[in-house]
Amino acid sequence: MPRLPAQPATEPSGAARVAAALVHAYTAAGAVLAYLAVTAAVARDFRASFACMFAANIIDATDGLFARRARVREVLPGVDGARLDDIVDYLTFVFVPMVVLNVAGDLSGPSALPVTAAVLLSSGYGFAATDAKTSDHFFTGFPSYWNIGALYLHAAGLPPAVNAAILLVFSALIFVRVGYVYPSKMPTLRGLTVALGCVWGAMIGVMIWSLPAVSRALLVASLFFPAYYAVLSLALDARRRAGLVSPRGQQSPRR
């Protein structure tokens, strides 16, 4: 017989069940935003499309906190919030950005379909890999931040061939098993990372509002956070591989 989900020690109250269900609905709202982003892209309202993706990113950054406070795993054990989150993330982080890049003409010509397929398929592997998220708060391989990449490529107005090359490079990086930090969970420099991320998020919001004419200075200045994130990830991954960081993210004693 199949094993039944573990039951909580005490039966959750009706209010607790409603709160947990609302958290799941909050996560699922990202799928609605994905639909709105696609319809906006088809109407060639790319600012609205990126705004929907930005809103979905805010949901993704905050729903985990709400889920922990509502104890969704204990209160509603029959609903897999992590699976729901992955479904929504694939739509908003991968599928929708590729729709926007194609409709906007940032990808065009014979290479558009192969490059789009490379992104969709590599990210499918990235989401399904058993080591996609580690217990010490790393993503393994490039974590499919295509929504951010699409905004930068669209705002920069680079030639489609250059965009295609960039997308292929990052698609390949999904298979390179380097650890990228989970910004809101990684203990090391978490306060600084979150603070810088908030500043960067505000800059991204201004960039979206400014579309289609984004200030070149703002675009370049906003790259400070992706650069910081990359350096932090590579440094901490190197320390982890050297055995200087324990699985809980604490510094290990030197041998």
Image: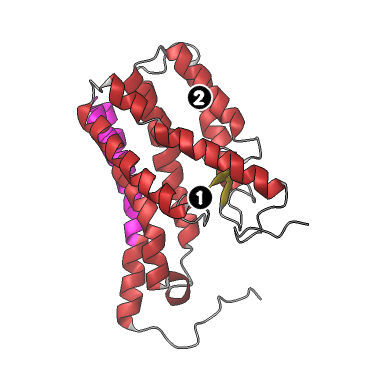
Q: Can residue 144 be seen in this view?
A: no
Label 2 and label 1: CA atoms lie apart by 22 Å
How is colour applied across the structure in the image?
secondary structure
**In x, y percent, where is residue 230?**
52, 36
Q: Quick check: 80 above or below 200?
A: below
**Secondary structure mostly seen in the magenta stretch:** helix
The answer to which image quadrant residue 199 occupies is top left
Tell me where the magenta segment starts and ends, as one range.
25-53
Instruction: Single out the residue that lies furthest toward the right.
Output: 255
Residue at the spot 50% in from the left edge and 21% down from the top edge: 166
Label located before the other in sequence (2 or 1): 2
Q: Residues within 10 Å of mark 1 (few under 14, many from 20)?
A: some
Instruction: Single out the residue that lies furthest toward the front.
Output: 254
Tag 2: amino acid: Leu
Q: Quick check: 108 above or below 149?
A: above
Q: Quick check: 135 above or below 215?
A: below
Q: Is residue 255 magenta?
A: no
**In x, y percent, where is residue 251?**
63, 58
Instruction: Single out the residue that lies furthest toward the bottom.
Output: 10
* Residue under numbered circle 1: 182
Element type at mark 2: helix
Front residue of 62/202: it is 202
Q: Is residue 255 visible?
A: yes
Query: Of the numbered discs in the image, which one, if any, rests on residue 167?
Result: 2
**In x, y percent, where is residue 171?**
56, 29
Residue at the spot 43% in from the left edge and 87% down from the top edge: 11
Residue at the spot 52% in from the left edge and 54% down from the top edge: 186
| Front of the two marks 2 and 1 | 1
